[in-house]
Image (cartoon, rainbow, N blue to C red):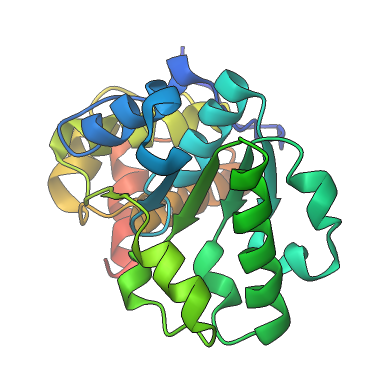
Amino acid sequence: MARQLSFDLPSRSAARREDFYVSPSNATAVALIESWESWPARKLVLAGPVSAGKTHLAHVWSDLSGATIVSSPDLVDADIPALAANHVAIEDADQIVGNRAGEEALFHLHNLTLAEGHSLLFTARAAPSHWPLILPDLASRLQATPTCTLSRPDEDLLWAVLMKLMGDRQILPTPGTIPYLVRHMPRDFDAATRVVAALDQLALERRRPVTRALAAEVLDKLQL
């Protein structure tokens, strides 16, 4: 029986490798993460739109390698030598663009981590060639880093993403709900996140299960 959504149950984010659905749009990225010990120059950039799975893959890589995960804005106040003593995943690396202190911290982390024999993973919305960095030396190093771009989801991947997002929120949609969403919403990860959050909120407010009718109402309200 579908969950009646009478209780505001906590969301659980699943970030294990077995929770990550592999499709043609992300298979190369998954293969690179799993073969991380063979990365050229021991570094990789994962680029792609919001909710494309970059953070999930960064956590998968952390599980495989024991890497530390740090958000790029936090690098300004971070202990760079301590971070460089391990493999490091820098999330949202493009967010430090234009921040000289942040760029300098990333530059030193890049050089010291590689000098220590460890590996680096960067996540960002675009490849480093599109980052208007202040520091030329940092720009040259990042632009020389191999980049894998996660593309927009195909139909199978959108289906899997919707199922994962609903599973994280402990939602059990009625039959036909996800097929309806896949047919009528944009193939966009950010849109999927917004749709599932809106569905959860509306279902909780009305104490109703997540149905095809509710999905149609949400899509109409969000005007996707």
Report x, y in % for residue 212.
Answer: 28, 38
Report x, y in % for residue 182.
Answer: 19, 41
Is 113 in front, or is 186? 113
Image position of 61 with respect to 19: above or below: below
Is 224 in front, or is 113? 113
**Residue 213 can be seen, yes or no:** yes
Is 58 placed left or right of 102 in the picture? Answer: left
User: Residue 135 is drawn in which quadrant?
Assistant: bottom right
| Residue at x 16% of width, y 51% of height | 184
Q: Which quadrant is the C terminus positioned in?
A: bottom left
Image position of 142 with respect to 4: above or below: below
Is 119 in front, or is 58? 119
Report x, y in % for residue 116.
Answer: 68, 40
Is 202 placed left or right of 38 in the picture? Answer: right
**Residue 208 can be seen, yes or no:** no
- Furthest residue to the front? 115
| Residue at x 79% of width, y 56% of height | 80
Is 177 placed left or right of 37 in the picture? Answer: left
User: Residue 27 is drawn in which quadrant?
Assistant: top left
Is 122 in front, or is 6? 122
| Residue at x 25% of width, y 39% of height | 158
Q: How many marks?
A: 0
